[in-house]
Image (tube, rainbow, N blue to C red):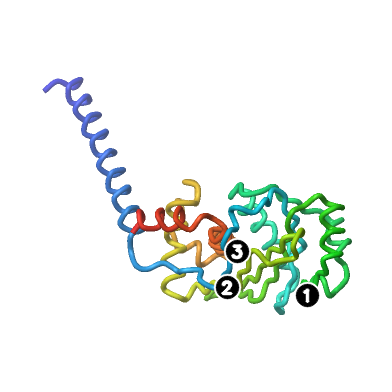
Amino acid sequence: MSKKETLRWGYILAVIGCCLISGCAYVQERVVTGLGPRHNTANFYRYPDFYDLDIKKVAVVGFQNSTDIPDIEDKVQEVFLLELKKAQRFEIVYNLEIDKALENERFITKGDFSNEDLIEIAKKFHVDAIILAQITQYRPYQPLVLGIKIKMIQTITGEIIWFLDEVYDSSLFGVANSAKEYYFNRMSPQHHLYKWDIVINSMKYFTQFACFEVVQTLKRKETYFKKRRFLL
């Protein structure tokens, strides 16, 4: 065999080898995402006819921090707002003027809005609903934990149309499996330089995962669970 032919066969074998390796990587991804039960975010309420409501613009009030860890509310809120915008359910409004308008402690901590208050807020900011959120637990060391309480109030009626009170604990098997699924199916390829457990070892990525799970409860139930069944 000539030197030229040897080089050609070497190139062909190298290409075949790369294809086999990429194929194995793909199979590995599908197997990993199919392992074990997922965490089911069950502690939430959504108005029965939520998707029939005329909610086009929503104001998000600054997150409240009920933990002993200072200065975390802005970080968590930033991630939540990003995930909420990705859902493309409605236009999101957040600015300091909203927080100033709701400086009264009874608004922030209790969400005790009168109908007059809601009408005033709706007129001033031209919003159809308000989201109040609270960080209930935050543990940035192993095992990572993030607790979030959220409620959405429709301004025209004063009714709570979405409520969630959930704790995401990375030590739980179901949460770890959901984090693994999130890593393979939601995180960009550049993050795949790391192992999947970066999601449960880094508070930054764990917060992204938790906020993603929270926003999923706003999606249509049939779409959400159909996708989950496909991944099983």
* Image-based side of 187 in relation to 173, left or right: right
Farthest residue to the bottom: give it: 68
**Res 10 seen here:** yes
Q: Residue at x 58, y 74 (%)?
A: 141
Q: Residue at x 63, y 68 (%)?
A: 163
Of residue 14 and residue 26, the one placed in the foreground of this image is 26
Quadrant of the rendered structure where residue 228 is? bottom left
Of residue 33 and residue 166, the one placed in the foreground of this image is 166
**Res 195 seen here:** no
Three-letter amino acid code at the position of disc 3: Tyr
Image: 14 above or below 42: above
Farthest residue to the left: give it: 1
Residue 3, x across and y down, in percent: 18, 22
Where disc 3 sits, the SS reads loop
The residue to which callout 3 is attached is: 47
Quadrant of the rendered structure where residue 31 is? bottom left
The N terminus - image quarter = top left
Image: 15 above or below 22: above
Three-letter amino acid code at the position of disc 1: Thr
Image: 50 above or below 70: above
Q: Earlier in the sequence, mark 2 or mark 3?
A: 3
**CA distance for labels 1 and 2:** 17 Å
Q: Crowding near pointer 2: few (<14 within 10 Å), some, many (20+)?
A: many
Of residue 152 and residue 80, the one placed in the foreground of this image is 152
Residue 75, x across and y down, in percent: 69, 61
**CA distance for labels 2 and 3:** 18 Å
Disc ID at residue 109: 1
The residue to which callout 2 is attached is: 166
Where disc 2 sits, the SS reads strand
Q: Earlier in the sequence, mark 3 or mark 1?
A: 3
Q: How many marks?
A: 3
Residue 11, x across and y down, in percent: 25, 29
